[in-house]
Image: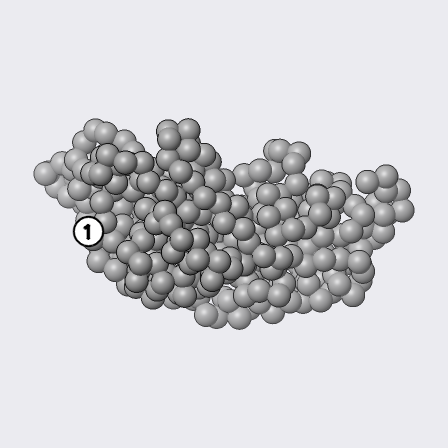
Amino acid sequence: MIYFDHNATTPLRAEVLAAMEPFLKEAYGNPSSVHEAGRVVADGIDEARVSVAAALNVRPDEIHFTSGGTESDNWALKGVMEAEWLRCKTRGTLLTSSAEHHAVLDSAAALERRGFRVDYHAVDGAGLIDVDRLLNTIDKGPKPTLVSLLHANNETGVIQPLVQIGTELRKRGVLFHVDAVQSFGKVDVHPEFLGADLISLSAHKINGPKGSGALYVRSGVEIEPLLHGGGQEAGRRPGTLHAAGIVGLGAATRIAEAGRRVTARRLQSLRDRLQAGLIEAVGDVEIHGGEADRLVQTLSVSFTGVEAEAVLLGLDQLGIAAASGSACTAGQPDPSHVLLAMGVAPRQAASAIRFSLGWGNDEAQVDEVLDVLPPIIARLRAMSVF
Ligand SMILES: Cc1ncc(COP(=O)(O)O)c(C=O)c1O
């Protein structure tokens, strides 16, 4: 199989599995227990916490382990909004964008149902937030409690100008949550630099295990827990810790950070080869977010006049995995909300394919796609009633 769907999930690296294995076998103690069996596991978790904290350049006690990006996003939004409500007895405003991941959009919708106000900010044709408009909205009031934005978009790879936004939000005393699920391990994600107060991460996007992630919460930020129970994670995220998953996140983080620059250079050259080859060999294609700063391994491209699902099926029959829209919405027939938010026409959005590259990909695989894809598109265009 040729796998070009790394923004959906990535394969587990052998070194990560090796780091996790003891915690699935002999190191089975409860990390909260005081005995040796528990302490061994607590030590493994501490090491992972230090690794994740080092990657973000923050204190280990600001890292809270979760079940992944979805939980981290839910917790950040609901936890901060609810904490302010409990403190002030008024329901505040959340500001986000209409091109966010569903983990944020659906958490925002849940908050709206509970009486909080949510403002959805538009993105431009390149997928970027208009910073001046965003700040204008904030300055005109009401001042939001929290702004939540993606660092890098999962569908297009577009990277938002967060340093500028975060700096301005900090001046205005507005809390800032960043969904860095796609950017962590690929570009610098330092809260101090980004001006972020909360950051969501997920292990399975960086060759770690599924069901493991973290939420960075800057010391001093008030956040209500989503779950209630034991005293784990300073009582903020109760539940017996998923030791193997956490150790896997730590190992995946160390590996991703160590090889980040070399990997980025290699993947950029592969992605650019794929993009240039498709433009030349297929014709009538539209690259989404191509004008913006993008994750170097992501390519979102519409093959005008053909339905994405038909292209994916054709590729799948040849053992090539890619995606249409984001993996989380793949079951839905609607065109990608991210592309629609960028002003892409619905039919063009319905013809968008996302190729997302990762450490296992090489030039031969890119060339294989460049060989087989143009005839698939030509065949589909010839019989198109789309
Ligand atoms: C940007 C973004 N946020 C959040 C998530 C959800 O993360 P998880 O799959 O770990 O729940 C994803 C997963 O696709 C994502 O791409």
Rendered view: 22 above or below 370:
above
**Chosen colour scheme:** one colour
- Residue ID at (71%, 40%): 309
Identify the element where label 1 is drawn: loop
Q: Residue 65 versus residue 91: which sits nearer the camera?
A: 91
Q: Position of residue 106 (x, y in %)?
A: 46, 36
Q: Position of residue 364 (x, y in %)?
A: 67, 62
Q: Is residue 226 left or right of residue 74?
A: left
- Residue ID at (42%, 47%): 95
Disc 1 packing (10 Å; few <14; some 14–19; many ≥20): few
Residue 129 visible to an observer of this rendering: yes
Residue 248 visible to an observer of this rendering: no
Q: How many marks?
A: 1
Q: Residue 190 versus residue 17: which sits nearer the camera?
A: 190
Q: Residue 197 versus residue 296: which sits nearer the camera?
A: 197
Q: Is residue 214 left or right of residue 180?
A: left
Q: Position of residue 218 (x, y in %)?
A: 25, 53
Q: Position of residue 85 (x, y in %)?
A: 26, 36
**Circle 1: residue type:** Gly
Outermost residue to the left? 34
- Residue ID at (75%, 63%): 279
Outermost residue to the front? 140
For disc 1, the marked residue is 220
Q: Quadrant of residue 235?
A: top left
- Residue ID at (53%, 70%): 265
